[in-house]
Image: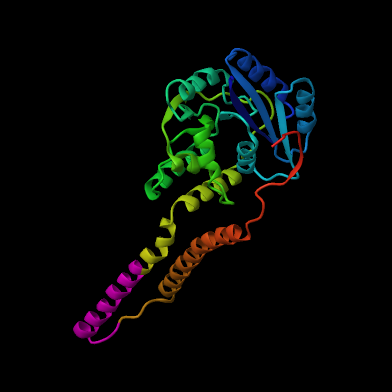
Amino acid sequence: MMKKLSVIVPCYNEEAVLPAFYDEITQVAAGCSNYEFEFLFVNDGSKDNTQNIVESFAKKDARVKFISFSRNFGKEAGMLAGLEHCTGDFACFIDADLQHSPDLIPEMLKAVDEENYDVAACRRVDRKGEQKFKSMLSGAFYKVVNRISETYIDDGAQDYRIMNRNVIDSILSMQENIRFTKGIFSWVGFNVKWFPHENRERAAGDTKWSVRKLFKYAMDGIIGYTSSPLRIPLYLGFILLLLSGIYALGVVIRLIVAGHVFSLTSGAILFAVMVVGGLILVSLGIVGEYLARIYTEVKDRPKYLIAKTNCDK
């Protein structure tokens, strides 16, 4: 029997690009005649005509499967749903906007099926076409998370990858509610072959990643894979304690030498109060972020709800 590749395509308001994506991905599949293909579209609560277009694909192509969420749960939930419902020996994550080049699939598939790699993953080699501010934030994120986390995440690593069934099952064994898939990919390890990938412009439509969403995503990555921020209040407390000791020593020396204690101006006192108050609030905010995630994990709500699907599993 031929081995099967499940191509998992998270979608959110992608009606403008889906026909072009389907044409290109089916052409790639036609060139891989030694493999069976499954195209699994995960509609993440789209508000446009995405679902109807996907269903039209399914009517003419039995390889097309779909999962439609009851609302928007986010790309991480879409990727998880794809892995939980795919039936292939291998699974491939790819975006519908054609920024991921489908023509890399045959070479990536060869790496995991013939070259004894567990994962074939793409790594971005440039950021042409991306806003400079977003590029700067992305670079800063990788530097910060790799400095403070025990899990190394490759700079430029993309979700675009092909994995064997062993890797798929390992990822599915991690059932945290707040998911940061790039961190999960790195945490599970395995033998990865990296493919350089040049940035492509979207074939149509607009990006769904705002700066606010990217910042939240980065926070999930940092908090989800390191407890180092929790040590910041401890370090700040030691620094303030040291400064207080130096100040007290200065007061004693002044009292001995000059016979009186110098007084601080009201402005200096106000500045000191604001600094200490700010540090306290920052410390409470850091602890609060971790507590919020603990609260979410304890509730253990479903990571997504399916409104409609044609998957047998």
Q: Residue at x 45, y 39 (%)?
A: 139
Q: Nearer the viewer, residue 155 or 120?
A: 120
Taking the image as drawn, is residue 132 in sight? no
Q: Residue at x 58, y 57 (%)?
A: 297
* Quadrant hosting residue 154: top left
Q: Is residue 13 magenta?
A: no
Whole-percent x, y for residue 42 in the image:
69, 35
Q: Residue at x 54, y 37 (%)?
A: 168
Residue numbers of the magenta segment: 238-261
Q: Nearer the viewer, residue 201 or 7?
A: 7
251 over 187 or under it: above or below: below
For the stretch drawn in magenta, the main secondary structure is: helix
Name the quadrant of the C terminus.
top right
Q: Is residue 251 magenta?
A: yes
Whole-percent x, y for residue 127 in the image:
50, 29
277 over 69 or under it: above or below: below
- The extreme left residue here reads 257
- The extreme front residue here reads 1
310 over 196 or under it: above or below: below
* Quadrant hosting residue 263: bottom left
Taking the image as drawn, is residue 10 in sight? yes
Q: Nearer the viewer, residue 231 or 86?
A: 86
Whole-percent x, y for residue 148 in the image:
39, 50
Name the quadrant of the N terminus.
top right
Q: How is the image coloured?
A: rainbow
Left or right of 82 in this view: 129: left
Whole-percent x, y for residue 116 in the image:
42, 25
Left or right of 136 in this view: 150: left
Label count reads: 0
Q: Residue at x 20, y 85 (%)?
A: 256
